[in-house]
Image (spheres, grey):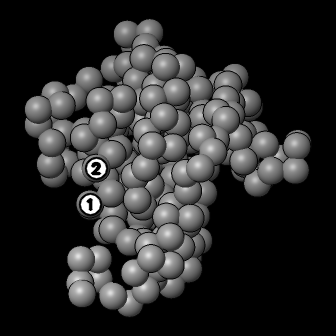
Amino acid sequence: MPDPAQPGAPGAGSKIQSLPALLAVREGLRAAGRQVVFTNGHFELLHPGHVRYLQQARSLGDCLVVGLNDDAATRRLKGPGRPLLSEEARAEVLAALACVDYVVVFGEDTAEQLVRALRPEVYVKGGDYAPEAGGKPLPEAAIVRAYGGRVALVPLVSGYSTTALIREIVSRFGARPPGAP
């Protein structure tokens, strides 16, 4: 596992890794019999819902890897004006969490390629991704099940949403910056 006292740019001791570096780490974890848990998302404004979700995901194995949608993918999927924070800033915030072992930034709209490459023992998403119950589709699930991995859906924490936070900020402050008269 990385040394949490060494945050920052990708490299030795950093939680933020390129995919090739992370694949080398993954092989070491596999050889040691460690269970890798993987999840992914945008994580634009980190809130208690995200933190609880990531803590629950981490509890399902020995190492939590978070795939972070890059800025271009976030714009494509969330719309203009997003992301609110750059991929570098979002990766740094995620890497600062004790429950997150590694962060890898990716540019695709789904995490299918990352899942194929990493082959985590457990793939975790929020409960809003339950396709069989009318939730959002989860294309990664078929890949995980094909190699014998497990898909875990974690219930969402009600009352927390980045979109709701953005709406609340706009409602309260409009174009006026907070603290301005």
Mark on residue 89? 1
Amino acid type at image mark 2: Val
Q: Is residue 73 visible?
A: no
Tell me which corner region of the image, top left, top right, bottom left or bottom right, holds residue 12: top left
Q: Nearer the viewer, residue 43 or 171?
A: 171
Locate residue 60 relative to residue 133 in the image: left or right: left
Direction from residue 172 to residue 20 in the image, left or right: left
Q: Is residue 174 above or below residue 161?
A: below
The answer to the question of whether label 1 and label 2 lie on touching residues, with beta carbons closer than 8 A, is yes
Camera-side residue: 154 or 3? Answer: 154
Establish if 180 lies above or below 111: below
**Residue 36 position within the rendered picture, expressed as x and y whole percent measured from the top left:** 47, 24
Give the residue at x 50% y 78%: 171
Query: Residue under circle 2?
Result: 93
151 vs 181, left or right, is right
Residue 80, percent from left and from top: 50, 84
Residue occupying image coordinates x 42% and y 61%: 44
| Amino acid, disc 1 | Ala
Asked whether the viewer can see residue 63, the reply is yes
Q: Residue 101: image x %, image y %?
A: 33, 31
Q: Residue furthest bottom?
A: 175
Q: Neighbour class for label 2 at 10 Å: few (<14), some, many (≥20)?
A: some
Q: Identify the element where label 2 is drawn.
A: helix
- Quarter of the C terminus within the rendering: bottom left
Between the residue at mark 1 and the residue at mark 2, the CA separation in whole angstroms equals 6 Å
Which residue is situated farthest in the front direction here? Answer: 181
The N terminus, quarter of image? top left
